[in-house]
């Protein structure tokens, strides 16, 4: 799946990004840096180059993004960050990003600080908490869901 539309008329892009789209992704990730941490511009560019970035657009506006990786050796997917702008939350956009990545792997994992509100989202969309680990600054929940 390279590009995908939804019933809301949104575009989910995995390739062919314009520089201004990547700039908007950078700004969006930084808007939510408290939740996802600081995401550096070179990491976004590298993810786009490797086709490990989903950019969600409503017309010309970037409203969401997901940075991920699929390990070649075992087809395990890892989501690093997923964000949806506030006015678009609760409309299934984050779930669609997760499902796009799920469609590319055997199973999908991610880590989330135990005190982060995002944990509720991951549980709601079907992830199972498999363990808690120590992070650099705080404890992290490790979530897992089967691929599709």
Image (cartoon, rainbow, N blue to C red):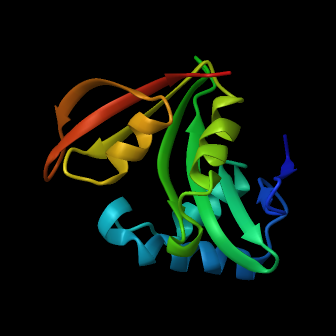
Picture coordinates of residue 109, whole percent (x, y): 45, 31
- Name the foreground residue: 64 vs 52: 64
Picture coordinates of residue 101, whole percent (x, y): 65, 37
Residue at 73 percent of width and 49 percent of height? 51
Q: Is residue 18 above or below residue 125?
A: below
Residue at 60 percent of width and 72 percent of height? 25
- Name the foreground residue: 109 vs 115: 115
Picture coordinates of residue 18, whole percent (x, y): 80, 75
Is 133 displayed left or right of 107 in the figure?
A: left
Q: Is residue 26 above or below residue 98?
A: below
Count numbered badges in the picture.
0
Residue at 46 percent of width and 69 percent of height? 40
Picture coordinates of residue 134, whole percent (x, y): 15, 37
Q: Quadrant of the rendered structure where residue 147 is? A: top right
- Name the foreground residue: 138 vs 88: 88
Q: Is residue 68 above or below residue 18?
A: above
Q: Is residue 108 above or below residue 120?
A: above
Residue at 81 percent of width and 53 percent of height? 6
Quarter holding the N terminus? top right
Is 117 displayed left or right of 10 in the figure?
A: left
């Amino acid at each position: 799946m390279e590009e995908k539309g939804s019933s809301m008329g949104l575009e989910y892009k995995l390739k062919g990004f314009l520089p201004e789209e990547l700039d908007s992704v950078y700004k969006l990730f930084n808007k939510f840096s408290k939740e996802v941490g600081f995401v550096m511009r070179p990491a976004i560019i590298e993810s786009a180059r490797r086709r490990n970035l989903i950019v969600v657009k409503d017309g010309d506006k970037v409203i969401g993004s997901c940075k991920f990786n699929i390990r070649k050796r075992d087809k395990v997917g890892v989501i690093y960050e997923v964000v949806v702008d506030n006015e678009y939350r609760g409309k299934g956009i984050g779930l669609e990003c997760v499902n796009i990545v799920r469609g590319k792997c055997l199973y999908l994992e991610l880590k989330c600080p135990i005190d982060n509100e995002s944990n509720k989202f991951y549980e709601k969309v079907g992830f199972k908490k498999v363990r808690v680990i120590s992070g650099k600054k705080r404890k992290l929940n490790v979530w897992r869901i089967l691929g599709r």
